[in-house]
Amino acid sequence: MSEIEVKNAVIESVKFDTERGLSAWIVLDYGGCGQAFGGWLLYLPRRWAHHANQVNYCGHWIYRVLEVAGVDDWSKLPGRTVRVKAEHSKVRAIGHIIKDDWFDPEIEFAALCAESASPAPAPQGGK
């Protein structure tokens, strides 16, 4: 397992995709190189077998990203600076640039899952 680093990053771009259900991505720029944060399966359409009893992971993910970045509108994310806890192959969490407020989807989704007794989503493959 690689070591987790904490570093600053600028949000370069954001996107949603529906390749395997609804996922969201934030592309981070470390100043010369970058990495993406996201890829969690946030929503399954009704036609998918596991749609029932789904916790609102999508709403939670979007709200926490906006909160940590210090904005109230998705379109204001590009250009914002955040802190990042990352390994070579994965961004584990993003944090507010000044406040001690971190969004780690694995931890927060597990807590939501425990509260609702429904299965936690799994992250999609890396991008």
Image (cartoon, grey):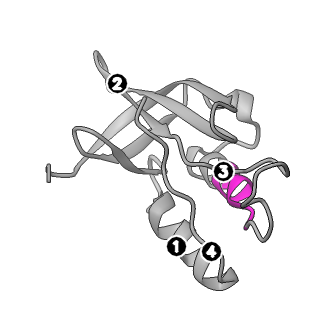
Residue 22, above or below 34: below
Mark 2 surroundings: few (<14), some (14-19) or many (≥20) residues within 10 A:
few
Q: Tag 4: residue type?
A: Leu
Disc 2 residue type (three-letter): Gly
In terms of secondary structure, where does tag 4 sit?
helix
Most common SS among magenta residues = helix
* CA neighbours of label 1 inside 10 A, class few (<14), some (14 to 19), many (20+): some
Graded by Cα atoms within 10 Å as few (under 14), some (14 to 19) or many (20 or more), the crowding at tag 3 reads many
**Residue 50 position by quadrant:** bottom right
Disc 4 marks which residue? 112
Residue 56 among those drawn in magenta: yes
Q: Amino acid type of disc 1?
A: Ala
Which residue is the site of mark 2? 34
* Residue 1 image position (x, y, % from top left): 14, 53
Q: CA distance from mark 4 to mark 3?
A: 13 Å
Q: Can I make out residue 3 in this image?
A: yes
